[in-house]
Amino acid sequence: ANITIPAAGTSTLKATAPNSVRSEGRAVCVHAGHDGTCGTTAHPSSSPPPSTTVAPATTAPVTQGPRPTGGPPARTLPPVPLAWVRGIREGHFFFGHGPRELHGSVEPDAAGLARVELRLERRHRGICQAYDARRERLRRIHCGAAHAPWFHAGNQPLFSYLLPFALPRGRYVLDVRALDRVGRTDRRLQRGRNRVTFYVA
């Protein structure tokens, strides 16, 4: 690049271009013959020439585009597994006795599925109970499905759990969740998908 600086002395030059990183400033000294600037020795008897001499400017190289960053690419995790209750519709009524088998599915069928868990709450005549898989019976809890304990229902995309007895009369809330091998799970409860309310009359 040819640059003209109108006055003697030190000036700072920078190189810029669209979509690039601006260079650092470089000092350039301009002198008019032996005028005492830029390290020259002044001669009083001599008059400065009509034109100025520009020292060649050296600019830093311009880097186009963003600078690359080191390290391996970020790891992409598979989607969180979504669980579904099958065989029991939202708001369904069972007459005589309730179901014994609880089953469902997990989508997508990812290889990272670690386990499937269920919880079951029962309300009848103002009393709340939850199914306790360790004791294989209903035990009293504070009302609310969140107080019911989770129990293991396998680690397969198509899962089922056989209760030791048919469910007695009452209003039930059945929740299901699937966990992958890093402990992730879908925390949203959607009626008709991973939460089903049903009745036994």
Image: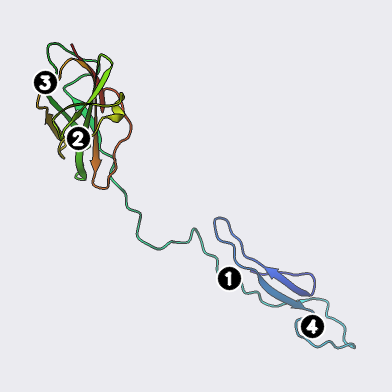
Give residue 173's position: percent from left, percent from top: 25, 23
What's the distance in space between the residues labelled 2 and 4, CA to CA? Answer: 93 Å
- Identify the image quadrant of the C terminus: top left
Give residue 52's position: percent from left, percent from top: 78, 76
| Marks 2,1: beta carbons within 8 A | no
Disc 4, SS: loop
What label sits on residue 163 in the rendered view? none
Inspect the image, locate mark 2, and give the three-letter code of the amino acid beneath it: Phe
**Of label 2 and label 4, which has the lower sequence position?**
4
Label 2 sits on residue? 151
Front-lying residue, 160 or 162: 162
Inspect the image, locate mark 4, and give the three-letter code of the amino acid beneath it: Gly
Q: Is residue 102 left or right of residue 1?
A: left
Quadrant in the picture for residue 164: top left
**Of label 2 and label 3, which has the lower sequence position?**
2
Label 1 sits on residue? 60
Disc 2, SS: strand
What's the distance in space between the residues labelled 3 and 4, CA to CA? Answer: 108 Å
What label sits on residue 33 in the rendered view? 4
Give residue 54's position: percent from left, percent from top: 72, 76
What's the distance in space between the residues labelled 3 and 1, CA to CA? Answer: 82 Å
Is residue 169 shown above or below 112? above
Inspect the image, locate mark 1, and give the three-letter code of the amino acid beneath it: Ala
What label sits on residue 166 in the rendered view? 3
For the point 64% across and 66% down, the residue is 14
Give residue 42's position: percent from left, percent from top: 84, 87
Is residue 118 shown above or below 96? below
- Identify the image quadrant of the N terminus: bottom right
Of circles 2 and 4, which is in front?
2
Front-lying residue, 70 or 186: 186
Q: Is residue 25 left or right of residue 49?
A: left
